[in-house]
Amino acid sequence: MPVSPEYQDPETIQRILHQARTIAIVGLSPNELRASNFVGFYADRHGYEVIPVNPREDEILGFKSYPSLADIPGTVDVVDVFRDPAAAVEIAQQAVAINARALWLQFGVISEEAAEIARAGGLDVVMDRCFKIEHARYIGRMHWLGFNTRVITGRRPRHLL
């Protein structure tokens, strides 16, 4: 299912990455082999406050896990979703209710209805994109390889040497 380009807008993605401080990861797994675990680990290592949301766990990556978004004390900038697309609508409603600033639906989590709910609630929406990959592309070191620079080269620019 193709995703509308408005939900993969580079300017929106960069704004979220630069402005966010807290990320509630819904569906964060304690299993180190799961993508959600690696994204949470990566986000923590890059200065984001990671808030696990998983009702089956008390702690993940050394952080207290909450059963739902509504149970999180304090503010949440980004709600990052690693759940089945069928759960995305309810998660979007919760994200609006807690006044999150953005709803980020990971690869394969595609729900136009959830996106519409979030947008109507004033949230930025990113869909079918990985937070870690986008962070590496725009803020990390992936740009050294030519991503989004419109230059394909294996050479590093002189100013980076």
Image (cartoon, rainbow, N blue to C red):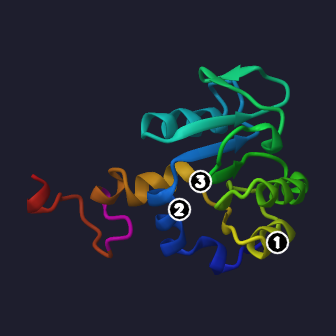
Residues at circles 3 and 2 in contact by the CB criterion of under 8 Å: no
Mark 3 or mark 1: whose residue is earlier in sequence: 1
- Residue shown at the point (14%, 55%) measured from the top left: 160
Instruction: Give me the disc on residue 72.
Output: none
- As drawn, the residue found furthest toward the front would be 74
Q: Is residue 29 left or right of residue 116?
A: left
- Residue shown at the point (59%, 53%) measured from the top left: 130
Mark 3 — residue?
130
SS class, disc 3 = loop
Percent position (x, y) of residue 87?
A: 89, 52
Q: Residues within 10 Å of mark 2 (few under 14, many from 20)?
A: many
Mark 1 — residue?
112
- Residue shown at the point (32%, 71%) measured from the top left: 149
Mark 2 — residue?
16
Amino acid tagged 3: Cys
Query: Which quadrant does the N terminus fall into?
Result: bottom right
Vertical side of 119 occupied by 31: above or below: above
Asked if the stretch drawn in magenta spans residue 49, the answer is no
Percent position (x, y) of residue 6?
A: 64, 79
Amino acid tagged 2: Ile
Closest to the camera, between mark 3 and mark 2, is 2
Percent position (x, y) of residue 148?
A: 38, 70
Vertical side of 161 occupied by 53: above or below: above
Specify start and end residues of the magenta stretch as a single range: 145-149
Majority SS type along the magenta span = loop
Mark 3 or mark 2: whose residue is earlier in sequence: 2
Q: Residue 129, located in which quarter of the rendered image? A: bottom right
Q: CA distance from mark 3 to mark 1?
A: 17 Å
Q: CA distance from mark 2 to mark 1?
A: 20 Å
Residues at circles 3 and 1 in contact by the CB criterion of under 8 Å: no
Vertical side of 120 occupied by 140: above or below: above
Q: Is residue 37 left or right of residue 73?
A: left
